[in-house]
Amino acid sequence: MAGYSKIPVAAIVGPTAAGKTRLGVELCLRFGGEVISGDSMQIYREMDIATAKPSPEETRGVAHHLIDFLDPGEEFSVADYLELAHKAALDIYSRGKLPFLVGGTGLYVSSFLEDLRFADIKVNRERKARLEEIAAHEGSADLYALLEKLDPELAAGLSPNDANRIIRGILVFEAEGKSLSDFKRESRPESPRYDSLLIGLNFRSRGKLYERIDSRVDHMLAAGLLDEAGFFYRRGLSRTSRAAIGYKELYPFIRGEITLEEAAENLKRETRRFAKRQLTWFKKTKNINWIYIDDYSGFDDITDAAAELLETAFALPRGRNGVLA
């Protein structure tokens, strides 16, 4: 793949359950690409069903990078993600493939495409330990409310249960007197290393998105989500597994406090709220080419629309067997 002054990257974003993984795989097969995950939870090993980690049947032989490589107990920052994602993009491009960034974690996606450089900020370790103790014993709701006051822009892109990143945002503000969002703006280079195309999947009817979310939760429960949640509960909860949507809503059932039906409904509600937060983040992102799923008769038409955007943006010739000519 030659003739580009910058590395071309196609990003597929949008709310959970919109079909990002499926579209990313199909486009990779058409254009000779590989996927870099833009999901902050799919990086963790053993957290498979709750994070909707793609199966071998779903990936259809397309290489997926930054998935399933980290223990849930290990810390992982945005800066860590960017280091690995940039290496993956360069590797994919150097082999004549097109990098596809696919995921719904807005902070990861925007930081990667804007080529941000995060400063090495020293935080108060004692304060960090205290906040982690609060999150472990009282939950992260109050910490999230504090972050909303200190850095509302960052808070809008995080789950209220994402204790690690909530705590990081609070500590940075307390250490430096300004927010992570301010650091992000200041670290933006004049000319990012990527020539990017953003494709967003969404529904004009919010009800149709919620129907798909409810269906996904039912499918995840049928696929063994309760057993997966029980595994982490018995093993001892890390902050990551405590925060993950899909586990924490089932823990009250595991403890015998509510019925499975109540737990399932709580999970559906929290997933819908998460989707709303994702949409809030991405609607503030510039230059997204939105594809509204309910405007099309089927997946093939959606894929064709996305393919046309790619062909126009990158002047891509389609070769044989989905490999770039």
Image: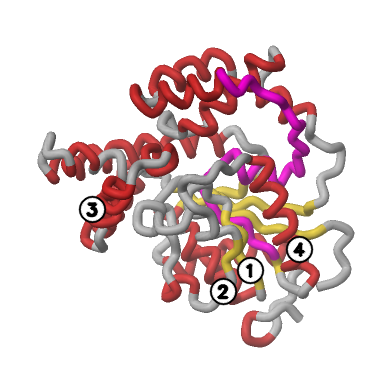
In the image: residue 138, left or right of residue 55:
left
The reply to whether discs 3 and 2 touch (Cβ–Cβ < 8 Å) is: no
Quadrant (top left, top right, bottom left, bottom right) of the N terminus? bottom right
Residue named by callout 2: 62
Q: Is residue 300 magenta?
A: no
Label 2, label 4: how many angstroms apart (C-alpha)?
Answer: 21 Å
The reply to whether discs 2 and 1 touch (Cβ–Cβ < 8 Å) is: yes
Residue 22, relative to residue 167: is it above or below?
below
Residue named by callout 3: 226
Q: Which amino acid, by three-letter code, is at mark 1?
A: Glu
Residue 275 visible to the viewer: no
Label 4: how many Cα within 10 Å (few below 14, some 14–19, many 20+):
some
Label 1, label 3: how many angstroms apart (C-alpha)?
Answer: 32 Å
Residue named by callout 1: 34
Q: Secondary structure at mark 1?
A: strand
Q: Residue at x 77, y 67 (%)?
A: 93
Q: Which amino acid, by three-letter code, is at mark 2?
A: Val
